[in-house]
Amino acid sequence: MSEAKQRVLYVVVCAAGVAGGVGELVSAAQARGWVVGVVATPNAMGFLDAEAIVAQTGYPIRSAWRKPGDPRPLPDPDALVVSPATFNTINKWALGISDTLALGILCESYGWGIPVAVQPCLSAAQAAHPAYGESLDKLRRMGVRVAEATPGAYSWTRALDLLGE
């Protein structure tokens, strides 16, 4: 009898004030049966307790490109959640800019055909910028499931809920 494949979820974390709480999302995903790997933007690394996340997931946090020939530290994902997603990351992602590992993974995810959900975390002033709305529209057309941002209130499980298990 073959063992069932475990579902792998990548949690992409951006540099927002709430980022240090990503362990809450990891716990919620694990409780739903996901194996979780965390990918962080370089600036997000300063917000995270890397040791705690590694202990929680069993995987290193990915933040930088690996060298050709280096082993892949995470299994391939079955789904992605971007939480918290900043104004910067949302706009670069929608434009196809992949100047960090996190953005490279997000840009490639479109071609992978896997579910992707995003939970924005930004100020009301940033949300009012026309580029933000245009970027969300483009991401939605790409099939990305977008949780509504509520400035001042953040839900760690809203984007996870959008995966529609």
Image (spheres, rainbow, N blue to C red):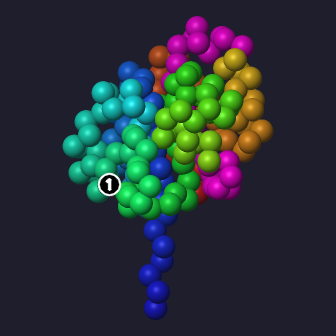
Locate residue 78: give its quadrant. bottom right
120 left or right of 96? Answer: left
Residue 67 pos. (x, y %): 41, 51
Nearest the viewer among 1 and 96 is: 96
Q: Is residue 42 visible?
A: yes
Q: What's the amino acid at mark 1?
A: Tyr
Q: Is residue 80 above or below residue 75?
A: above
What residue range appears in magenta? 109-130
Neighbor class of circle 1 (other Cα within 10 Å; few <14, some 14-19, many 20+) is some
Residue 71 pos. (x, y %): 38, 61
Q: Is residue 105 above or below residue 3?
A: above
User: Mark 1 highlights which residue?
Assistant: 59
Q: Is residue 96 above or below residue 61?
A: above
Residue visible at 47% across and 86% down in the picture: 2
Nearest the viewer among 71 and 153 is: 71
Residue 152 is inside the magenta segment = no
140 left or right of 56? Answer: right
> Farthest residue toward the right?
141
Locate residue 97: give its quadrant. top right
Q: Quadrant of the C terminus?
A: bottom right
> Farthest residue toward the bottom?
1
Residue visible at 52% across and 19% down in the picture: 122
Nearest the viewer among 160 and 75 is: 75
Residue visible at 22% across and 43% down in the picture: 51
Residue 91 pos. (x, y %): 63, 25
* Numbered circles on residues, count: 1
Residue 13 pos. (x, y %): 44, 36
29 left or right of 116? Answer: left
Q: Is residue 102 above or below residue 16?
A: below
